[in-house]
Image: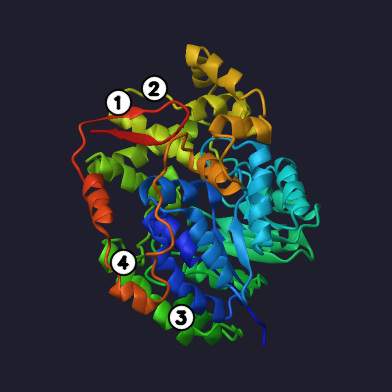
Amino acid sequence: MDEVKIVDTTLRDGQQSLWAYRMRTGAMLPAMEDLDSAGFEAIEFVTPGPQFARMVRDLKEDPWVWLRAGTERARRTPLRIHGSVASRLSPIPRSTQHLMLEKLAGMGIRTTRASDPWNDFDELDETVRMMSEHGIQTILNLVYSVSPRHTVEYFADKAREAASRNPYRICLKDVGGLMTVEAAHQVIPAVVAAVGDVPLEFHAHCTNGLAPYISLLAADYGIRVLHASVPPLADGDSQPSVFDLVRNLTARGYSVDVDLQRLEPVREHLERVRRREDLPAGASRVFDAAIYEHQVPGGMLSNLRFQLAGLGMEHRLPETLDEAARVRADLGYPIMVTPLAQFVGSQAAINVMTGARYKHVTDEIIQYATGVWGKEAAEVMDPDLRADILSRPRAREVVAGTAREPGLEEVRTTYGAELSDEELLTRVFAGVGAGPLDLEGGERIPQTYADYRGHRRSIQDVIRAVDNSRTVTGVYVRRGSSAIEIRR
């Protein structure tokens, strides 16, 4: 009987895709022991850039409390970083990337799964080398997309290109949940044939309701590692439910060594978290042809919905998604994966809210036009739009600001020479400057399911929750960020 292994994505991609990284440390920690004991191949654990930003800016939590306590509870199952540690919406100096990797490797994390938004594996070579220096092995993502440029031959060629590097593994990643059954029957066997003996994983989002079945097809075509999540952080914009996937694989004749009974308390706990925090549950989706136009992935959808809701403009999400399709075409059909998905989505929202296309552009769109976010970008985007963007005075400032790579001592000088390594990394990866951060420590954080049930949020938590729900009066685009910011 063929064995299929499962990688758990609950606390990383599940919460990113459905809850926009809004789960607190005290909600995640109680689940770690059962996740660790359930028999997963690995657990996706942290994405330093966006996760640090959410924990520090919005939750007012010290991310190192989660990192230290979470890794201590993983005694059986390997934990993974997701992405390169440069995965934030603005470039992170290599010197601080190395320092972050040193810290994560010191906590026992030995694997990452990294993408280049253009499937440019030449560009990923530097990430692989950097990871290897710190004893971390890299799974190369081959990201699926749909456009006139993304043919079956394209994916077969890219799979061969990735396999030629003899990586630890390759992951066929359908970040937008775009793969149809017809496409799966063509693309998956072509990729399997192209990679040869390199082990494959399959990662897909349920955005269009098809990933649970296509994951089974991936197994049928020989992929032996699939990704899944625990409800309510499964389905919808997230990965397939581990309960459904394991049962379907078993019915199909595969052996899967995952203890579903061990995961029932996790499901019950996360449902309790969802109700307490008024967060959405993943649910099965019906097929929606519009997804093939905007291709905004699950993680970006949840953040975009969250940002628009904060501005009192959630009703304009459909309009923003329509505009995202147009922006993506203008930019030459980039693959909608971090950070390009955020650039496209944020620029679309700005175009909609200002009522004028590209009257205001983010610094990252300017960088995109110069090739900072992939040399292919400058070659495939609309030439008239590129010329217009690069003719603006701000473009000269942005180009000058990205020309030099600061060393670690210069970074320390910028943020504060007296800061510890962890404090420095918190500020760099969360994108916050000088001044007190006022982050909550570990003394009040629930450690068990019972602790969480008995936990009551502090008055500071309540004040922050009320503050975050106030009516807004306007928006502005902060230079140096694709984020939409709120002016009250």
What separation in Å lies between label 2 and label 3 (alpha carbons)? 47 Å
Whole-percent x and y of residue 179?
52, 57
Q: Say which amino acid is labelled 2.
A: His
Judged by depth in the image, the label closer to the viewer, 1 or 3, is 3
CB contact under 8 Å: marks 4 and 1: no
Circle 2 crowding by C-alpha within 10 Å: few under 14, some 14–19, many from 20 = some
The mark found on residue 354 in the picture is 1
Judged by depth in the image, the label closer to the viewer, 4 or 1, is 4
What separation in Å lies between label 1 and label 3 (alpha carbons)? 46 Å
Whole-percent x and y of residue 443?
41, 64
Badge 4 element: helix
Circle nearer the N terminus (2, 3): 3
What separation in Å lies between label 3 and label 4 (alpha carbons)? 16 Å
- Where does the N terminus fall, quadrant-wise? bottom right
Whole-percent x and y of residue 393?
49, 11
Circle nearer the N terminus (2, 1): 1
Judged by depth in the image, the label closer to the viewer, 2 or 4, is 4
Q: Going by the image, does 418 lie left or right of 222?
A: left
Q: Is residue 154 above or below residue 259?
A: above
Circle 4 crowding by C-alpha within 10 Å: few under 14, some 14–19, many from 20 = some
Q: Say which amino acid is labelled 3.
A: Leu
Instruction: Let me know if residue 178 appears in the view.
Output: no
Circle nearer the N terminus (3, 4): 3
What separation in Å lies between label 4 and label 1 (alpha carbons)? 34 Å
Circle nearer the N terminus (1, 3): 3
Residue for badge 3: 263
CB contact under 8 Å: marks 2 and 4: no
